[in-house]
Image: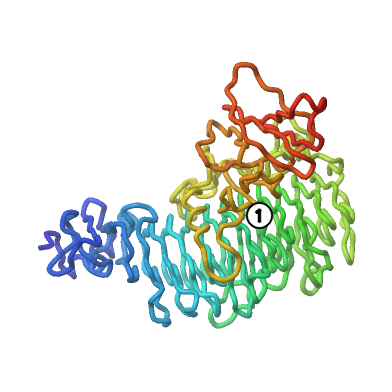
Amino acid sequence: MDTRVRCAGTLAVALSLGWLSAANAATLYVAKSGTDSGNNCQSENNPCATIARGISSMVGGDTLIVGDGTYAEQIARPPNGTANAYTTVKAARDWGVTIDGSGFADNYQDGIRVNGSYVVVRGFHVKMNQAKTTNIGVDLYGCNHVKVQRCSVAYAGTSDNVEAFGVGPGSDYVLLEENYVYGGARYPFLIYQSTHTVVRRNVSRLDYWNGGLQAANFTNYNGDMTVWQNNIAIDSDTKDIAGRLYGGFFNENKVPDSSWSGTATRETFRGNIVLNVQAFFSGMYDYDVSNLHTYSDNVIWDSHGGYYGDYMHGDAPMLDATRFTIGKIRGTYSGPDGQGSAGSGFFIGPGTGGTKVAGMVTNSIFANNPFYGLADYATGDYNAVSNNAAGNYGGKYTTPPAGPHDVTSDSSGSLKYLTRIEASSTLQTAGSGGGPIGANVIYRWGATGTLWGEPGYDSITSELLWPFPNEDVIKADMASYSGPGATGARGFERHRRNPAVYVFSDGQLTARPLARCRDGGDLRDAYRRRFHGFHDHGDRLGLAPANVQQGPEHRHRPGRQQSRRRFESRRGSWRWLRLPDGRIRNDFPRSRGRAVRGGLRLETP
């Protein structure tokens, strides 16, 4: 028998006045070995069998712990908590529980659905069905003060208007933190007609979507006061998206109508990364800047386009952009009326009715692009703009002026790793006020678990971002994808016998395999940078620097034990020696009488 007071009238009063506290809350249990009949779920030794039974047994402020296993049922509408006592539904072990929605009827049967207040959901893997067109992985609509942490969605619908994580309409104060998506959805992460949303440390990969409209990894659609922190859009290609992949990040502000009366889409982007996203438009497609959009310490690398900013309607557009690192962009520039940022670093369009986005971009790197560094109506200063093939500044309708303090000489030595600028390098002090030029994505933005407006929610912390939270879980799970579109084991999820475009670990991001090994890997398998005390362990993958320079072999320090691996290149073969401290040296036979021709010098901090 439930020993707590369950008087409906008393409970309603307690909830409305906020009397309910953690001291009054109970912990309930569900497990595959449990039973529902006559069970109030309050004993860990006698759990209930279904999540539905567990939730129906809860009152606001309770915690439900779900044991490992697969449950073919929803997590639906947990009871409201209070500011002092959140209702919590969590897996006993992060990602130890799978919500299997693959067999749900195609009539808005979501994997997780919350439309109440003061609720936390944590630790669930949601598996949906790509053929279902109405079911959402995690649906948060009409809710407030809700936190979803360390959940994942795979195989969401691949046609119609389906999202994996959907916030809104009508939601307020929502946190999405340390989640990931792969294997489907038009919008893996969508903020729709909602306010005060924080999206922090999530990973999105678009493998396939067959609908006729645009898609994007992270999307703000009439959302106001949205904060994006340390999110990663990775390894996505418009060729796998029938209606076009618009960008790693995409913002649109629709004309106000009966469902939305707002005119602003205020957004903040801090420490986000777009890596190998071959979108039709750009890495960050800010299609409609309305009111203030703030950017700091963001990376766009080896993608189709860099940053695209323009104005359609809404509040006067303002941009506060600093410390971008944008380079190795691939696309073909075709002017403001086409793919404005394709092939270029930073583009600002002409705006509707001549209303252009106000503000400058500062302290940023735009380098090694096939067209321009800054294009058309972009303006800035204290930027490093170099090695852009068609010119550092250019465009179809106008050419941006060079900033009086811009650095146009080759400064590649300052950028060995995409996530930081090297100490004592040229760009470390070339920015405004003697500060750095380029992104710094080393530490976490936002205190873990904080909602918009709470202390520390939008501050840089002293916690290292790398290794990225749960990267091993994410890589292994994404590699398992076996649906249509791109193969699962690629890029971020690469393993040694499947060479790929990217490997991602410990604060290092690199562009292309440097050379192939006989076992199918590449030089990065043997290279492990020491990063604030993190070391290589077994088969764990590390990365090479962003700019790998040619040069003579490394010298071996006497007395150090060595482990050997043989590699091949187009110019012959050589031995690489990995030293215990993570350094690599080239052990080309002395009998050749010279250093390796075309050898790689891998530099460690």
In the shown orientation, is residue 112 left or right of residue 367? Answer: left
Q: Position of residue 497 (x, y in %)?
A: 58, 50
Quadrant in which the C terminus is drawn: top right
Q: Amino acid at mark 1?
A: Leu
Q: Quadrant of residue 5?
A: bottom left
Q: Position of residue 108 (x, y in %)?
A: 42, 79
Quadrant in which the N terminus is drawn: bottom left
Using the image, determine if residue 55 lies above or below residue 133.
above
Residue at 66%, 53% (x, y): give it: 501
In the shown orientation, is residue 473 left or right of residue 268? Answer: left
Q: Which residue is denoted by mark 1 in the rendering?
A: 275
Q: Position of residue 483 (x, y in %)?
A: 53, 69
Q: Position of residue 577 (x, y in %)?
A: 64, 30
Colour scheme in the image?
rainbow
Q: Quadrant of residue 100?
A: bottom left
Along the viewing direction, whichever of 326 and 58 lies nearer the viewer: 326
Along the viewing direction, whichever of 284 and 570 lies nearer the viewer: 570
| Residue closest to the far front | 591
Tell me the SS state at disc 1.
Answer: strand
Q: Is residue 493 visible?
A: yes
